[in-house]
Image (spheres, helix red, strand yellow):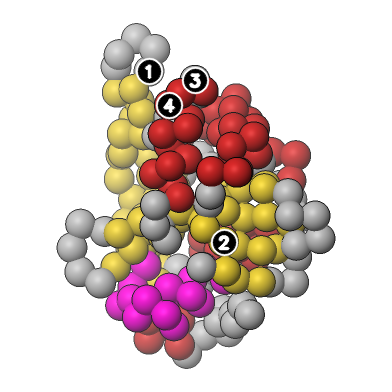
Protein backbone atom coordinates (compact mmCIF):
# COMPACT_ATOMS: atom_id res chain seq x y z
CA UNK A 1 0.00 0.00 0.00
CA UNK A 2 1.31 3.43 -0.92
CA UNK A 3 -0.26 6.85 -0.43
CA UNK A 4 1.38 10.09 -1.49
CA UNK A 5 0.30 13.39 0.01
CA UNK A 6 1.75 16.86 -0.32
CA UNK A 7 4.47 16.23 2.29
CA UNK A 8 4.29 12.53 3.09
CA UNK A 9 4.52 8.99 1.85
CA UNK A 10 2.32 6.58 3.77
CA UNK A 11 3.19 2.96 3.17
CA UNK A 12 3.46 -0.46 4.69
CA UNK A 13 6.22 -0.99 7.21
CA UNK A 14 9.10 -3.31 6.30
CA UNK A 15 12.04 -4.81 8.14
CA UNK A 16 14.46 -2.16 6.79
CA UNK A 17 12.54 0.42 8.87
CA UNK A 18 14.00 -0.91 12.12
CA UNK A 19 16.29 2.02 13.03
CA UNK A 20 13.65 4.66 12.35
CA UNK A 21 10.97 2.50 14.01
CA UNK A 22 13.10 2.07 17.12
CA UNK A 23 13.71 5.83 17.27
CA UNK A 24 9.96 6.49 16.91
CA UNK A 25 8.92 4.03 19.61
CA UNK A 26 11.62 5.12 22.08
CA UNK A 27 10.62 8.74 21.51
CA UNK A 28 6.92 7.89 21.96
CA UNK A 29 7.52 6.05 25.21
CA UNK A 30 9.60 8.96 26.60
CA UNK A 31 6.84 11.55 26.07
CA UNK A 32 4.63 12.69 28.97
CA UNK A 33 1.50 11.81 26.96
CA UNK A 34 2.62 8.15 26.68
CA UNK A 35 0.60 7.43 29.84
CA UNK A 36 -2.54 7.83 27.72
CA UNK A 37 -1.75 4.92 25.40
CA UNK A 38 -0.87 1.27 25.53
CA UNK A 39 2.80 0.92 26.27
CA UNK A 40 5.13 -0.32 23.57
CA UNK A 41 8.16 -2.49 24.29
CA UNK A 42 11.55 -0.83 24.06
CA UNK A 43 13.97 -3.77 24.04
CA UNK A 44 15.53 -4.63 20.68
CA UNK A 45 14.23 -8.19 20.41
CA UNK A 46 10.61 -7.27 21.11
CA UNK A 47 10.82 -4.20 18.86
CA UNK A 48 11.86 -6.50 16.00
CA UNK A 49 8.81 -8.66 16.71
CA UNK A 50 6.56 -5.60 16.85
CA UNK A 51 7.92 -4.29 13.55
CA UNK A 52 7.27 -7.70 11.98
CA UNK A 53 3.67 -7.52 13.19
CA UNK A 54 3.30 -3.96 11.87
CA UNK A 55 4.73 -5.13 8.52
CA UNK A 56 2.28 -8.04 8.21
CA UNK A 57 -0.77 -6.13 6.96
CA UNK A 58 -2.36 -2.76 6.27
CA UNK A 59 -3.34 -1.92 9.85
CA UNK A 60 -0.21 0.03 10.82
CA UNK A 61 1.20 2.32 8.15
CA UNK A 62 4.59 4.02 8.14
CA UNK A 63 4.46 7.81 7.80
CA UNK A 64 7.56 9.10 5.99
CA UNK A 65 8.65 12.51 4.77
CA UNK A 66 8.13 12.70 1.03
CA UNK A 67 11.39 14.51 0.31
CA UNK A 68 13.77 12.34 2.34
CA UNK A 69 11.87 9.12 3.02
CA UNK A 70 12.61 9.52 6.75
CA UNK A 71 10.23 7.54 8.98
CA UNK A 72 8.54 10.03 11.32
CA UNK A 73 5.46 8.20 12.58
CA UNK A 74 2.63 5.79 11.98
CA UNK A 75 -1.05 5.92 11.27
CA UNK A 76 -3.12 2.91 12.26
CA UNK A 77 -6.43 1.56 11.00
CA UNK A 78 -6.97 -1.33 13.40
CA UNK A 79 -9.87 -3.69 12.79
CA UNK A 80 -12.72 -3.31 15.27
CA UNK A 81 -14.11 -6.39 16.98
CA UNK A 82 -17.21 -6.39 14.82
CA UNK A 83 -18.67 -4.78 11.74
CA UNK A 84 -17.04 -3.05 8.81
CA UNK A 85 -15.28 -0.59 11.11
CA UNK A 86 -11.70 0.28 11.97
CA UNK A 87 -10.13 2.31 14.77
CA UNK A 88 -7.95 5.21 13.68
CA UNK A 89 -4.86 6.22 15.65
CA UNK A 90 -1.69 8.11 14.88
CA UNK A 91 1.75 8.80 16.29
CA UNK A 92 4.26 11.37 15.07
CA UNK A 93 7.76 11.63 16.53
CA UNK A 94 7.97 14.56 18.96
CA UNK A 95 10.54 16.53 16.93
CA UNK A 96 8.20 16.37 13.91
CA UNK A 97 5.02 17.53 15.64
CA UNK A 98 3.34 20.88 14.93
CA UNK A 99 3.91 20.59 11.17
CA UNK A 100 0.48 19.12 10.34
CA UNK A 101 1.86 15.65 9.60
CA UNK A 102 -0.58 13.80 11.90
CA UNK A 103 -3.56 15.51 10.24
CA UNK A 104 -2.15 14.97 6.75
CA UNK A 105 -1.48 11.28 7.31
CA UNK A 106 -4.82 10.73 9.07
CA UNK A 107 -6.77 12.42 6.24
CA UNK A 108 -5.05 10.21 3.68
CA UNK A 109 -5.72 7.07 5.75
CA UNK A 110 -9.37 8.05 6.25
CA UNK A 111 -9.84 8.58 2.52
CA UNK A 112 -8.14 5.28 1.72
CA UNK A 113 -10.24 3.45 4.35
CA UNK A 114 -13.55 4.67 2.96
CA UNK A 115 -12.64 4.49 -0.74
CA UNK A 116 -10.65 1.27 -0.92
CA UNK A 117 -11.57 -0.72 2.17
CA UNK A 118 -15.25 0.23 1.84
CA UNK A 119 -15.64 0.83 5.56
CA UNK A 120 -18.95 1.87 7.09
CA UNK A 121 -17.31 3.98 9.79
CA UNK A 122 -14.14 4.79 11.67
CA UNK A 123 -13.74 5.17 15.41
CA UNK A 124 -11.12 7.17 17.27
CA UNK A 125 -10.46 8.00 20.88
CA UNK A 126 -8.10 9.93 23.07
CA UNK A 127 -7.55 10.75 26.70
CA UNK A 128 -9.48 13.92 27.49
CA UNK A 129 -6.26 15.45 28.85
CA UNK A 130 -4.54 14.88 25.49
CA UNK A 131 -6.08 18.06 24.10
CA UNK A 132 -4.01 18.08 20.89
CA UNK A 133 -5.26 14.62 19.90
CA UNK A 134 -8.87 15.39 20.84
CA UNK A 135 -8.79 18.58 18.77
CA UNK A 136 -7.14 16.84 15.83
CA UNK A 137 -9.71 14.03 15.79
CA UNK A 138 -12.53 16.57 15.89
CA UNK A 139 -10.92 18.62 13.09
CA UNK A 140 -10.90 15.50 10.89
CA UNK A 141 -14.70 15.46 10.92
CA UNK A 142 -15.25 12.91 13.68
CA UNK A 143 -18.25 13.43 15.93
CA UNK A 144 -18.01 12.87 19.68
CA UNK A 145 -20.09 9.87 20.77
CA UNK A 146 -19.24 9.60 24.47
CA UNK A 147 -16.87 10.26 27.32
CA UNK A 148 -15.95 7.62 29.88
CA UNK A 149 -13.10 6.45 32.05
CA UNK A 150 -10.70 4.21 30.19
CA UNK A 151 -7.76 2.03 31.14
CA UNK A 152 -4.82 3.06 29.03
CA UNK A 153 -1.99 1.12 30.58
CA UNK A 154 -0.67 -0.52 33.72
CA UNK A 155 1.59 1.55 35.96
CA UNK A 156 4.96 0.48 37.33
CA UNK A 157 3.12 -0.52 40.49
CA UNK A 158 0.95 -2.96 38.52
CA UNK A 159 -2.16 -0.87 38.97
CA UNK A 160 -4.37 0.06 36.01
CA UNK A 161 -3.94 3.66 34.86
CA UNK A 162 -7.37 5.21 34.35
CA UNK A 163 -8.13 8.52 32.67
CA UNK A 164 -11.23 10.23 31.30
CA UNK A 165 -11.40 9.53 27.57
CA UNK A 166 -13.32 10.94 24.63
CA UNK A 167 -14.59 8.64 21.87
CA UNK A 168 -15.47 9.68 18.33
CA UNK A 169 -17.00 8.23 15.19
CA UNK A 170 -16.83 9.20 11.52
CA UNK A 171 -19.51 7.53 9.43
CA UNK A 172 -19.16 7.06 5.69
CA UNK A 173 -22.16 9.28 4.77
CA UNK A 174 -20.80 12.09 6.93
CA UNK A 175 -17.36 11.76 5.32
CA UNK A 176 -18.85 11.62 1.80
CA UNK A 177 -20.81 14.83 2.35
CA UNK A 178 -18.05 16.72 4.16
CA UNK A 179 -15.25 19.09 3.30
CA UNK A 180 -12.87 16.66 5.07
CA UNK A 181 -12.52 14.38 2.05
CA UNK A 182 -8.98 14.02 0.81
CA UNK A 183 -7.67 12.17 -2.21
CA UNK A 184 -4.13 10.86 -1.78
CA UNK A 185 -2.41 9.70 -4.94
Instruction: Determine whether 71 is above or below 10 in the image.
Output: above
- Disc 4, SS: helix
Residue drawn at x 75%, y 62% is 66
Q: Residue furthest left?
A: 82
Q: Position of residue 123 (x, y in %)?
A: 36, 62
First in sequence: mark 1 vs mark 3: 3
Q: Which residue is mark 4?
A: 46
- Disc 1, SS: loop
Viewer-closest of 56 and 118: 56
- Disc 3, SS: loop
Viewer-closest of 60 and 82: 60
First in sequence: mark 2 vs mark 4: 2
Residue 11 has which mark? 2
Residue drawn at x 81%, y 60% is 67
Residue drawn at x 65%, y 39% is 20
**Which numbered mark, 1 or 2, is in the foreground of this view?**
2
Residue drawn at x 37%, y 76% is 117
Q: Main secondary structure of the magenta part?
A: helix
First in sequence: mark 2 vs mark 3: 2
Q: Residue furthest top?
A: 157
Residue 181 has which mark? none
Mark 1 and mark 3: Cα distance apart in space: 18 Å
Q: Which residues are magenta?
A: 107-122
Q: Residues within 10 Å of mark 2 (few under 14, many from 20)?
A: some
Q: Which residue is mark 1?
A: 155
Amino acid sequence: MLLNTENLIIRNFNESDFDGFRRLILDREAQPDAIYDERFPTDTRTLHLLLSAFSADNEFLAVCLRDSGELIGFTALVRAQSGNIRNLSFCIRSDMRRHGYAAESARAAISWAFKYLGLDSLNAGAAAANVASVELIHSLGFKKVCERTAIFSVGSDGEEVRHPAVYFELRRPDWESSAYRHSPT
